[in-house]
Amino acid sequence: MKTNGISHFIEHMVFKGTKNRSVKDIARSIESVGGYMNAFTGKEHTCYYARVLDEYTELAVDVISDLVLNSTLPAKDLEKEKGVVIEELKNAEDDPDDIIHDYFDKALFGSHPLGYPVIGTESNLRSFTRDDLLKYIHKNYVPNRMVLAAAGNVSHDKLVALAEKHFGTTRKRSHAAGAERKRPQLYHPEKKDFKKPIQQAHICIGTQAWSIKSKHRYPTLVLNTLLGDGMSSRLFQNIREKYGFAYSVYSYATLMSDAGVFSAYIGTDKQHIETSTDLILKEFEKLRLKSVGKAELNRTKAQLKGSMMLSLESIPNRMMRLGTSELYFQDTNPIDAIIRQIDGVHQDDIQAIANELFREDRLSKVVIHPEPKDQVPTNAETATATSKAGQVV
């Protein structure tokens, strides 16, 4: 995919100057009032954000809108920033417990855009021109694709007024925007092995899941909490506490606009790869075959609700929740409604989605094997096998 990595690269380049501010001006504009500004790019969106005292709310909106609407993308900085992002890419490749999730997404989604790493590839990064960035911005940085969210001591009416003032002249949406988007449908389970000069093996086992809008959303979140979120989870108690095979073992559910990922991860000694894999699969199978006990289910729900409520004590987390809710649902789901949805999850719901997710013919597995540096081939991937027939998600 020729544009893979361009969103993340643009995120870097907008900080190189705007029509109104130099690089130093951008940095000093927020820091001079004790604030903080940054950005990140995920699979489905880029976020530019600032944290300031409430009296500087307009300044924050002014600076962010300037970055989004008026970046000059100076040609003199283009090649230099490519080098910076390529170093970021190399840094990620040197972090196996991070990069394995990119490898796993590739196993799940293949040539679909969700199968590509957010940061892109070195060849793509080197190929981007200033015109490529400008065309991408013109197509995607448009009002219908943007959300302005704020949390803290700011009123909705004030934020609307600031949006109209600083974003009101933004060009209208391009008709082509979003036209190329396609939903991943066919899933072919894969087993992939890689070798890296590291000390520990890293393993991901899982499958495609549902979108954030699915009726299975809350049962999936409860299942994930029960299986591998925290010290009381089944994976932690069994694999770490009982056998001592890992320092880090967990599961995760990533729910996106029209697809999702459910996976278990473990980092372990190479001698324990097969045993650890078997233990994870046994936990999957237990959830398929045996209904969760009522006491365990209630404890898990309480854990999920409590962590969700506590996260809202963070103002940045509140801002992110508002923004993502608007992006995915064009509305804000009240926390009370979310609590009711979690409370409404039954034992049968957990077993039903476990039976759907954890079938053997749905599971993909990616392993990064530790090998001495002199034995790792130039092409780190040493084996790829596709198993079973494709499944419709």
Image (cartoon, rainbow, N blue to C red):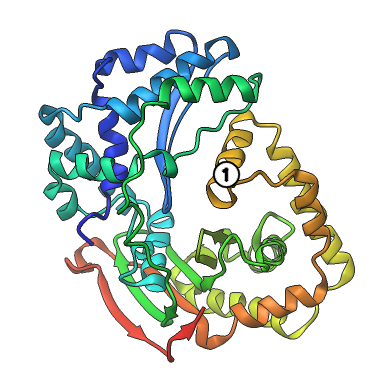
Quadrant showing the N terminus: bottom left
- Residue 17, placed above or below residue 254: above
Identity of the amino acid at label 1?
Glu
Q: Secondary structure at mark 1?
A: helix
Residue holding disc 1? 326
- Measuring from the top left, give residue 326's x and y in whole percent: 57, 44
Query: In percent of the image, x 85 and y 73: which residue is there?
Result: 293
x then y, percent, for residue 37:
43, 24
Residue 66, quarter of picture: top left
Nearest the eye: 298 or 219: 219
Mark 1 Cα-neighbour bin, 10 Å: few <14, some 14–19, many ≥20 = some
Q: Residue at x 33, y 34 (%)?
A: 171
Q: Quadrant of residue 141?
A: top left
Residue lying at 42% horizontally and 18% vertically, measured from the top left: 62
Tag count in the figure?
1
Instruction: Indicate the quadrant where residue 298 lies.
Output: bottom right
Q: Nearer the viewer, residue 277 or 292?
A: 292
Q: Can residue 380 be spotted in the picture? A: yes
Task: Find residue 186 and report its horizontal and vertical position in percent.
Answer: 42, 80
- In the image, residue 2 lies at what x, y percent? 20, 58
Q: In the picture shown, does residue 392 fall above or below 370?
A: below
Q: Residue at x 66, y 57 (%)?
A: 229
Q: Residue furthest bottom?
A: 388
Nearest the eye: 168 or 304: 168
The residue furthest right is 295
Residue 247 visible in this rendered orientation of the protein: no
- Relative horizontal placement of residue 173, taking residue 151 as reference (left or right): left
On the picture, is 5 further left or further right than 301?
A: left
Of the pair 254 and 10, the residue shown nearer to us: 10
The image shows residue 19, relative to residue 185, as above or below, that is: above
